[in-house]
Image: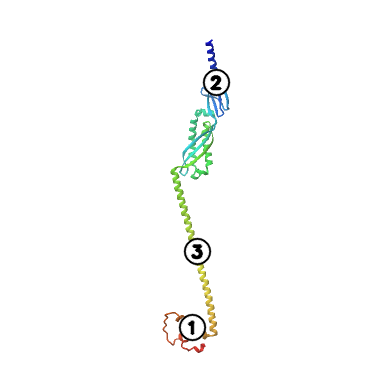
């Protein structure tokens, strides 16, 4: 009886073991490949409880969640020769579990290495077609799209789908940063020198215009003053002529008095003249009666 009981327990344990060996559960976060002697028999994509042939069929679990690959501090060169350090993050998932198993043996580590290599190549090509300014901001969205599209064929060959590629950070390398600062500094100095040159040119133009305007104003003023002086002289001569025509003797007397004031009024004036000179005719009394 004891032997029969032990044998029965052994058979029951074997049955239980076989039952548990034939049952597997598919989680909602994964896919399961069922293989027979290394060959894929079927793929279970939906979560639930499934059966397999014990010891003959085996299961291979494949991630069904979104996966992330980070590429940090990748050195890339733009078209003008400057270099950057670029950080990217790639979002992907297993789209074809069978191909994923056949190509990389369902190894995420191997898949990450291959995709990372292709991303680095796509980064180099994409940045190599851009200028310094465009690589920093202008074409950022287009660049991410180009990188994603460049990586997709290689990912599809691995059974993967590239969902998105994002450039997280783009930094200048230290030597390039120094060169950029020096270039910007030189550009600012050149711009300041140009502004000063423009200012000096404008100053010269303004001063030349002012000098020309001053000369014109002075010339106009002198012309007008000469005209006014000429008019005054003409009127004065007219008055003198009228006075001369009315009383010639008085006019001669007046002119002689003006000549005396002009000649003898200055201090220290010495004149050597004959007493009988016409200049002293009004001092001699010869024309006193006439003037009276």
- Quadrant of the rendered image containing residue 97: top right
Q: Indicate the secondary structure of the residue bearing disc 3.
A: helix
Q: Are marks 3 and 2 in contact (CB under 8 Å)?
A: no
Q: Residue at x 45, y 49 (%)?
A: 185
Is 40 above or below relative to 128? above
Mark 3 or 2, nearer chain start: 2
Q: CA distance from mark 1 to mark 3?
A: 48 Å
For label 1, the crowd category at 10 Å Cα-Cα, with few meaning under 14, some 14 to 19 and many 20 or more, is few
Question: Total number of numbered labels?
Answer: 3
Q: CA distance from mark 3 to mark 2?
A: 107 Å
Q: Residue at x 54, y 14 (%)?
A: 9
Front label number (3 vs 2): 2
For label 2, the crowd category at 10 Å Cα-Cα, with few meaning under 14, some 14 to 19 and many 20 or more, is few
Mark 1 or 3, nearer chain start: 3
Residue 259: % across, % down: 47, 82
* Residue 20: assigned label: 2
Residue 74: % across, % down: 47, 38
* Residue 257: assigned label: 1
Front label number (1 vs 3): 1
Q: CA distance from mark 1 to mark 2?
A: 154 Å
Q: Are marks 1 and 2 in contact (CB under 8 Å)?
A: no
View extreme (front): residue: 2
Q: Residue at x 49, y 35 (%)?
A: 116
Residue topped by disc 3: 210
């Amino acid at each position: 009886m004891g032997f029969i009981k032990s044998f029965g327990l052994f058979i029951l344990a074997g049955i239980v073991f076989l039952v548990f060996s034939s049952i597997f559960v598919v989680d909602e976060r994964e896919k399961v490949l069922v293989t027979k002697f290394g060959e894929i028999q079927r793929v279970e994509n939906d979560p639930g409880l499934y059966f397999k042939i014990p010891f003959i069929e085996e299961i291979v679990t494949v991630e069904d969640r979104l996966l992330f690959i980070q590429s940090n501090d990748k050195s890339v060169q733009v078209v003008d020769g400057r270099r950057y350090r670029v950080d990217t993050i790639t979002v992907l998932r297993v789209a074809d579990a069978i191909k994923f198993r056949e190509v990389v043996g369902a190894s995420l580590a191997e898949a990450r290495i291959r995709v990372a290599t292709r991303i680095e190549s796509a980064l180099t090509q994409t940045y190599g077609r851009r200028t310094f300014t465009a690589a920093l901001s202008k074409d950022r969205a287009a660049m991410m799209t180009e990188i994603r599209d460049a990586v997709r064929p290689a990912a599809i060959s691995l059974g993967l789908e590239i969902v998105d590629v994002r450039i997280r950070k783009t930094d200048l390398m230290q030597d390039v940063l120094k060169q950029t600062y020096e270039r910007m500094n030189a550009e600012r100095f050149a711009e300041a020198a140009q502004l000063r040159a423009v200012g000096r040119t404008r100053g010269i133009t303004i001063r030349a215009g002012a000098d020309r305007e001053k000369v014109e104003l002075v010339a106009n003023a002198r012309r007008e003053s000469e005209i006014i002086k000429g008019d005054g002289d003409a009127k004065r001569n007219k008055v003198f002529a009228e006075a001369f025509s009315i009383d010639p003797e008085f006019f001669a007397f007046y002119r002689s008095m003006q000549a005396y004031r002009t000649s003898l009024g200055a201090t220290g004036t010495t004149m050597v003249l004959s007493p009988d000179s016409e200049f002293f005719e009004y001092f001699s009394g010869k024309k006193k009666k006439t003037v009276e």
